[in-house]
Amino acid sequence: MPLHVKVLLALVLGIVAGVPLHWWWTDATWAALGVGDSAAYLAHKAAVGGVGVGGEASDPNAGAGVAAAGARFVREAGAFAGQFFLRSLRFIAVPVVLFSLIVAVAGVGDLRVIGRIGVKTLMCFGFTLVVAVAIAVLVGRYGAPGTWIDGEAKSVLMAKYANPDAVKSSVSTAQRIKDQGVSGFLMNVIPTNPFNAIANAEMLQVVASAFLIGVGLTMVPREKSQAVTSLCEGMTEAIMVLVGLIMKLAPLAVFCLVTQLVASVGLEALRALLAFCICVVGALSIVLFVEYPLLMLAFTRPGNRMTYGRFFRGMAPAMTLAFSSSSSAATLPVTIKCARDGLKVPADIANFVCPMGTTLNMDGSALYQVISVLFLAQLYGVDLTLTQHVTVGIMACVVAVGMPGLPGAGIAMLAIVLESVNVPTEGVAIILAVDRVLDMCRTIVNVSGDTVACVVVAGSENRLGRDDAGSAGGVPEGAGA
C-alpha cells in the first residue's frame, strides 16, 4: 500500500476515533474514574477543590485509580507520537533549506542563469498570489459568510473559544510589524548573525543566507568551492535519507494528531461557522483545481504536459503530510522529494524553488486572511468600500511574504490585516474556533503552490523530466511516495 494511502486511511480513522471521544468522553467520564479536576490531572498538578472532614483542603483527584492513569497515559502517548513526528520534520526543515539552496545556487554556476531562474520564480509566486487573493475577495464578498451567523451564535463562539493570549499575541504582532515598517522588514531579511537565524529557525533569513553563500561560491574558483559544495550535497543526501525514515512514522502520527484535534474541537464549531468554512475551502479548491492546473498546462510542452493525474499522483505524499501537519516548513523535505521524483523536476530547480516558496509563497494563507477579514467585517457590520477591499488584498499579500510556515502562524498575522480596515481584532477569537482545521486545508495550497512554481520554471527552461530529476538525494526507493 503506498504511503500516502496509509496516511489518508490514518486520517479517516483519526476522525472516526475523535468524534465519539469528543461526544462521550466528558468531565462526567473522568468523574466516574475518580477524577474531579481533569485539567489538573492531565497536567500532573495537584488540584485543591474542597474541604475534608478535619477542615483541611481535599484533593478532588484523590480517587483516581489505575483506569484514570491508563486513560491519561494513552492520551499522553498519542500526543507524544504526533509531536515527536512534527518535531522530527521541523528538525530537518532548516538544514534542508540551508544546504539544498546552497547546492542549487552554487550548482548553476552562472549568475545570469541564477538571476533568470530567480526572476521566473518570483514572477510565478507573485502571479499565483495575486490571483489567489482576487479569488478570495470575490468569494468573500459575494459569498458573504458573515451574514449567515446570528448575534447569539457569535456570542456563544466568543465565550467558548475566546483566547486572550492568542488575541493579545496577534495584536502585539500587528503593532510590532507596524512599528517596524516596510524598510525595517526588508532590512531584517538579511541577518546580522546567520547562525542566530539558523538557531531560531528564521526561515526568511536562512533562505537569504543560503542564497548569498551560494552566489559567493559561484564567484570562487571551482577547485576551492568544490569541497564546500560537496559537503552541502552530502548533507542534503543525508537529510533526504532521514526523511524516508521519518515518513515511515507518518500514518501513526497522523492518526494521533487528527484524533487529538477532533476530540478536543469536535464538529460544533464547524456547524456554527459552516458558511465561512465553505467559502474558505471553496476558494482554496478553485486555486488548487483550476488556477494551478491551468498555469502548469500553459508552461509545459505538448509532449510533456503536467496533467491533473500526473500532478496529484506525484504530490499525494506531500499533500497528505501538509494536511496532517499544518506546516509547510515541516513538509518541505517531502515537497522537494515529490517535485523531483513524482513530477520529474530537475533537482537543482526543486532545491532552489521549494525552500524559497516555504517563506515567500503562501497563496493559501493570503487567501485565508482575505476571507477571514471580509467575514469578520460582515459579522460586525463594518461596510468595506472598494478601496478597503483592495487594501485587504494588498495587506494579505504583504503579510503572506515571509510568514512562518508553522501551524497557527496565519492567525497571528490576521490582526495586521484587520487593523488595516478597522475591523475589531477581538473577532480573532471566533476564527480560532475553526482555524486549526482550515489551517490544514490552506497548507495543502501553500505546499502545492511551491511545486507548481517548480513545474512552471522547469517547463519554461524546457527541462521538465530531464537532467538529474529525481536521481539525487539518496532516498530509498518508495520512501515518502
Image (tube, grey):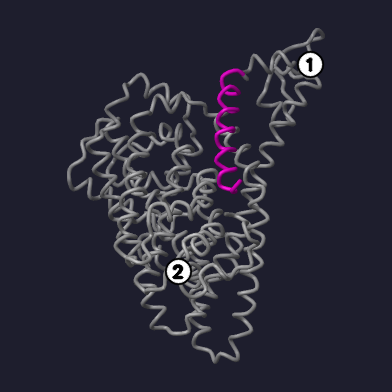
Which one is closest to the eye, mark 1 or mark 2?
2
Quarter of the rendering containing residue 9: top right
- Left of 277 or right of it: where is 99? right
The spot of residue 179 in percent (x, y) is 38, 56
Q: Which mark is residue 63?
A: 1
Disc 2 element: loop
Residue 295 within the segment the image draws in magenta: no
Q: What residue is shown at x 53% (from left), y 55% (from top)?
A: 329
Our reading of the magenta stretch's main secondary structure is helix
The spot of residue 393 in percent (x, y) is 28, 50
Q: How far apart are marks 1 and 2 (CA)?
A: 65 Å
Kindly identify which residue carries mark 2.
465
Kind of residue at badge 1: Gly
The spot of residue 385 in percent (x, y) is 18, 42
Kind of residue at badge 2: Gly
User: Which mark sits nearer the N-terminus, 1 or 2?
Assistant: 1
Residue 3 within the segment the image draws in magenta: yes
Provide the residue span drawn in magenta. Answer: 1-24
